[in-house]
Amino acid sequence: MAKKITKQVSTKARDVNTQKKIYVLAETVTKAALSGKEPIVSVPTRSRSNTIWNKKRGILEMGNATQDRQLFNLNQAKIFMQTLLHSGSIKDLIEADKTLSLRGMFYKGLHTVAGTKEKTFVDQTESDGILEDLEVSLTALREELHIFAKKAGSIVGNITLIDSGDEIDCRRMGSGGYAIPSIVEPDVIQFKKCEAKFILHVEKNTVWSRFNEDRFWEKHNCILTEGGGQPPRGVRRLLRRMHEELKLPVYCLLDCDPWGHYIYSVIKQGSISLAFESQRLAIPEAKFLGIRAKDYKACGLSDDVQIALNDNDIKRAKEIAAYPWFQGHKPWQKEIEGLLTNGFKMEVESLITKDISYVTEEYVPQRLKDKDWLE
Amino acid sequence: MVGKDAALMSKKQPKSGKSRANKSVEESSDGAAPRKGKNRGATAEEMGSRQRDISVSEFFAKNRHLLGFDNPRKALLTTVKEAVDNSLDACEEGGILPELAVIIEDLQPDRPATSKSSRYRITVVDNGPGIVRKQVENIFGRLLYGSKFHRLKMSRGQQGIGISAAGMYGLITTGKPMQIVTKIRSSDAAHRIELAMNTKTNRAEVTADAETKDFPPAKLRDVTAGSRSLAATDGFLSPKIFPTGTSVSIELEGRYQKGRGSVDEFLELTGIANPHARITYVPPSRESGADDEELLPADSVATAVDAGEVKVEVTSEHHGVIMFPRAVNELPPETREIQPHPKGVELGTLLQMLKEYEAAEKGSLYKFLQDQFCRVSASTAGALCEAAGATSRTRAGDVEPQQAEKLFAAFQEAKLGPPPVDCLAPIGVRQLLAGMLKGVRAEFYAASSREPEIYRGRPFQIEAAIAFGGELPTEESSRVIRFANRVPLLFQQSACSSFKAVAETGWKNYGLTQPRGSTPTGPLVILIHMASVWVPFTSESKEAIADYDEIRKEMKLALMECGRKLGSYLRKRLKMRREGERRDVFERYIGEVSKSLHHIHGADTREVYDALLAQAKKRTRQADQVLNEDGKVVKAEDPSDQEGVLVVADAIPALAQSDRSEVKDSHLEAKKPFQSANVNAKTKRGKVSANESAKIKKSKRDDDSPTLFEAD
């Protein structure tokens, strides 16, 4: 089925490992089937209940709970079939040494189930879920499965990268920046040269553009990244690698709302759905620079920037306050309390009401200078 | 063909029935001659000279609607009905498995399409014991002559009016006499007699009388293409099948139309209630008043229903000839004649009985009570005599009217055992199932037979059966088919006690929809049979059973029993359907899983597929037994394990569908839940189990002679 394309890059050791894992999965099912036992695929549970807060390491980790995917269960039969179908697709990808996007995988596995009018996948969401399951059950990273997500996130700054052999000078990226790929593992991306002293990560592209246009990274000798809201894995992994390998501190500039707090939490501790990857993604030392609840008064912002908290926001804020890693943390409790007391949210862009470049020329430099951040 | 059975003929002269009928006629003629003014001229003598006996026959000739000859369509039906009833009664009394041929010839096939009626010749041939020559005139030529009226014994006919009235109707409308051919010994020649009824004298006149070897009459085999073909292949009307018997032909003005209340329906229902009879029916070639000649279907392949070990041939059509096959091989149990029960007589009847007893035997009241009633012991008789203010020596003829009244009152208060019930011959659960199975194409059949009960001192017994699903229409109101002593009741449904019983039964409890105060809706046929020594009809034309509380209660109980079985089956079927869906889901993905495993692991696709499929089947069956639709653990129960239930698996839509899915060799296995054919050999009176599961096999009728239900 899969055309074997012999690339110059020989099949890497971890591909062999992944192939073996897939083979074992299929073998377990086959043996069960032939011996009349129930075919089961065991999948670590990806739910909040199976997420453990490792206080010592400061990250979220996945527990040991697993779920059995049974073929002979009405609710799981289709998922079981899809799991094996995607396993086969991944085998093909590894053999061909190619990667596919999540959407690509959806199409690869898509066909009509023999003898019916039913399609193997109703939509991409189903397919994505199966792939996340496969990651955890094969304990293989997505990139090891030769799958990538769509690109989201940009980088500029005093750093030179090598991406698949091409040299990327992040100082010369114009107004658009370099798009952070989904797979940023060392065999794809290497750091060649870095003068930067820290990383400023901003929530979204609009704010990032402001900083890039003002050449913030040049003036302050740093790296500027954005993750389009909640940063995808590629961005988080790159941040983590730069933080770890280049010893760069990470500062986050996010909105003053529960969503901003949550993004910070994900960067710092990891997320529930990707708890199994926290150890590769989380940056426990990441710092929250702003926007802070106190800034409304401290910066003398006008009433116009207020966005009222709705019920959902309040509920969410309280949930976040109850996260174990925020719970015993007084400054954070105070910060969330401040948000609730204010009764409104503030976006980073609200600082533009002061001056177009207020955020790049006064706000961030002052905070960095005062070491006024939350951790 | 003799309701008025040959052997018993000699002794009876109709007395009470005739005299009573005459009396009422005389009364009415008295009323019709009013005495008005003296000067009108009519003297008592003159009037007296005009007053004379009115023949019963003449009375009925003028009042034929009383007997079911109201219109040409009904006349045709009534004639067939009376002849068939007599034939079946005769065969059963003679201990012969009934073999009937009903032939209706259209004698004016070229009439204009607009004419509403036509002239028909109805011929009914049976293989009964035949009729002795000298009784032929009495049986067919006189009204109110018969063996059945005076007895408290279960039989189809009761009054002895039917066949002679039909003959008379024929004579009036066409002028043609009735033709009878009867043969009492296979070695002897048959008698061929033509009878014309003289309505004035209540006597038949023989217009032709000859001996003949031609029985059954050969020309009957040559009526239609279908009958010719059947005679050649199936021995239709061959002397072998009819060594003795009677053939009656009546020509009459009638109207043939299919549908409700038609001859076709009557014979269909007769077949259901009489599974021991085989009836071949040659219908007329076209309906009356129909614009086009009815296109008769070509040879339709007969279908045999194979209910486990039990195989039943179902009703089939052969070049327009309809065959109602025999489904059981034994005759209904013979019934005994019983004496009336004291609580069942009326005062007038009691007086009459006393008078007759005095005239015949001149015994004492004490002896009279013991002789003429059932369930009166010597001591009871003594007590009754005392209560009537008489002694045990008092002669029956000396009982004063006041004493008789006291005696009658004492009857009502006395503690007496119920009348004996061996006078009843219920159809039987197994036979009902067989009858329904051959006549109604459904998937589920249930039947129940109640124990005998008493109304007005007369024993009766109620049986019910239902057929559900299959080819029955789903949106319509269910069909109620009613029988009294195995005779179908076709008219006045809503006046009938049985219909009320159906409407009063809560069918919703059994998973059916039921509009308020009405019969349930759905693919359902409901059968109710009342067996009794005297069925209380609402009218002389015997169309509806009178609404006695005792009777209706029994009917409801029988229906509820069937309903419970149906409810249990429907729940089971729902479960089966869900299981089928589950299995479908599994089977759907197994193919993909096997392919993927082959792709990754190199496992043999087919081998893995088969292994998984086997597991899927096993699992869905296990789940089926363990859980009900609410997810609660229930005891495994298969409706076909119950008594009096029959399930035809192939007629179940969901299951049949899942069977069609790919794997053919596991065909039988998939059906296993229905094959738990544990033959239950319990034999209670009136409760014979036929808890067979069933499947329909399409087979050519000629290859498959019917295997009949084995006796338990």
Image (spheres, coloured by chain):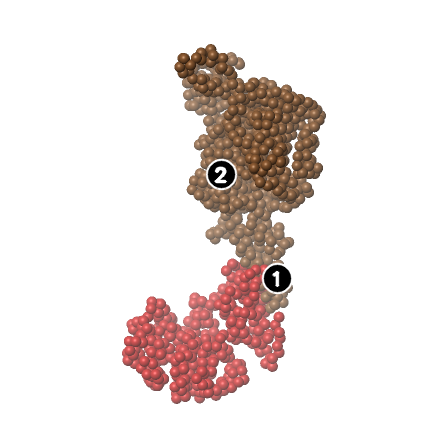
Chain colours: A red, B brown
| Location of residue B191 in the rendering, given as x and y in whole percent from the top left corner | 67, 24
Q: Secondary structure at mark 2?
A: helix
- For residue B7, say whether it is visible: no
| Location of residue A93 in the rendering, given as x and y in whole percent from the top left corner | 57, 73
Q: Nearer the viewer, residue B592 or B92?
A: B92
Residue placed at 37% from the left, 71% from the top?
A320
The amino acid beneath tag 2 is Leu
| Location of residue A141 in the rendering, given as x and y in whole percent from the top left corner | 51, 74
Residue placed at 60% from the left, 46% from the top?
B695
Q: Nearer the viewer, residue B410 or A149?
A: A149
Residue B237, located in which quarter of the rendered image? top right
The amino acid beneath tag 1 is Val
Q: Badge 1 sits on which subunit?
A: B
Badge 1 and badge 2 both on one subunit: yes
Q: In the rendering, which numbered label is found on residue B559?
A: 2
Q: Nearer the viewer, mark 1 or mark 2?
A: 2
Residue placed at 51% from the left, 18% from the top?
B54
Residue placed under numbered mark 1 in the picture:
B608
Mark 2 and mark 1 in contact (Cβ < 8 Å)? Answer: no
Residue B680, located in which quarter of the rendered image? top right
Q: Is residue B238 left or right of residue B358?
A: right
